[in-house]
Amino acid sequence: MIIEPRMRGFICLTAHPEGCAQSVKNQIEYVKSKGKINAPKRVLVVGASTGFGLASRITAAFGNDAATIGVFFEKEPAPGKTATPGWYNSAAFEQEAKKAGLYAKSINGDAFSKEVKQQTIDMIKADLGQVDLIIYSLASPVRMHPETGVLHRSALKPIGQTFTDKTVDFHTGNVTQVSIEPAVQEDIDNTVVVMGGEDWKMWTDAMKKAGVLADGATTVAYSYIGPEVTSAVYRKGTIGQAKNHLEATAFEITDSLKDIGGKAYVSVNKALVTQASSAIPVIPLYISLLYKTMKAKGLHEGCIEQMQRLFADRLYNGGEVPLDAEGRIRIDDWEMRDDIQEAVKTLWAQADTETLKEIGDLAGYKNDFLNLFGFGFQGVDYLADANEMVQIESIS
Ligand code: NAI
Ligand code: NA
């Protein structure tokens, strides 16, 4: 069928299989163009189908020929109804890995569950024996707790007081004021349960117990800090509490892996257009100003550039892993540069519906958003019939 984007608020209801495949191929080409990275050969990625997790999987596989297992939660296609983009991305990734002679298998299910953890452990035991690196890159609005069966819902709210500032509807370019009521304690607690570090530690505990962590195994999860203008809704808001918890959990995991010489890191990444970030108020306006500023200075990166740099310059640079005062890896270093932040701050004060066309990179935002769903890629014939029923080889 001919597949067109069908937008509904922060999401697109359709995805283009060939466009998603093109996106994966472009990311593979980028990683290959940067040369070999002396990184691990057996890698598990939890949250492997889109965004930073997919880019991590591509970097591991095509940066150093790693065998990868990817865990994700995506919707498969049905006749006349497309799959979610992560499904098509993963199908394309497996195909490209196979062509390159690389092991790649995937598990589609709820990573928060005991069952999916066990299924993953069984697959590692059967195929790889152990893994050397676990990337933890889940972004989810809900988590069913595996012990209590309670379904927790995260919130994106400020803490303490009502937040009022500008936001943009990136489809129309309309800049308006948004007000968000402060979280109640329950919102904070739920957000920490969903996006904090508890599940990350459950993964490493279960894997260690099963003996599938290699000596010296490393695990990495992703965090965000960002500027003053987004801090009320992000770092000082409910999601920030979850990120504090995630960052603290890294030290707990490192402790728990002492006897095998393992280590847990948090990497603070750059703000980028992903399905997760486009749902957060204020962030799209910040990103459109940030993109404009960083592109003008030649400093712009997408997920794949960020993950390639994380592997090559931070985790596997041949020496110490550089950390900040709080023990975190920083690849948001270019975003947080004083000159970038000063420029964005000035633009923020000027931003309205009229000025944004000039001072913001709304076109870049929209293009990246379309790209998430496989639309807007060069070399893809969007007027041609596409096969929506693409399968993932290791799953079907
Ligand atoms: P994303 O939405 O592109 O990817 C989320 C991944 O998690 C997908 O593979 C999805 O299938 C998987 N997933 C979600 N729920 C699942 C479940 N129950 N079971 C199994 N898999 C599940 O998100 P993105 O942006 O790549 O986020 C990954 C991490 O990076 C998050 O911790 C996020 O906070 C962090 N981060 C994101 C930034 C951004 O600007 N997008 C900036 C810095 C950090
Ligand atoms: Na991800």
Image (cartoon, rainbow, N blue to C red):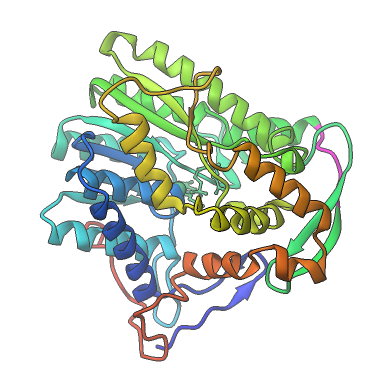
On the picture, is 302 further left or further right than 272? Answer: left
**Relative image position of residue 217 (x, y in whole percent):** 28, 23
Is residue 104 shown above or below 369? above
- Residue in the image at 69% along x and 67% along y: 170
Question: Looking at the image, which is closer to me, 342 or 140?
Answer: 342
**Relative image position of residue 154 (x, y in whole percent):** 66, 42
Q: Check residue 173 for magenta coloring.
A: no
- Residue in the image at 14% along x and 51% along y: 102
Question: Looking at the image, which is closer to me, 396 or 54?
Answer: 54
**Relative image position of residue 162 (x, y in whole percent):** 89, 41
Res 47 visible: no
- Residue in the image at 41% along x and 85% along y: 382
Quadrant where the N terminus is found in the figure: bottom left
| Dominant secondary structure of the residues highlighted in magenta in the image | loop
Which residue lies most toward the left here? 101
On the picture, is 291 further left or further right than 214? Answer: right
Quadrant where the C terminus is found in the figure: bottom left
Is residue 327 shown above or below 377? above
On the picture, is 64 further left or further right than 233? Answer: left
Is residue 12 shown above or below 297? below
- Residue in the image at 71% along x and 63% along y: 359
Which quarter of the picture shows residue 275? Answer: bottom right
Q: Give the range drawn in magenta.
A: 179-184
Is residue 379 shown above or below 347? below
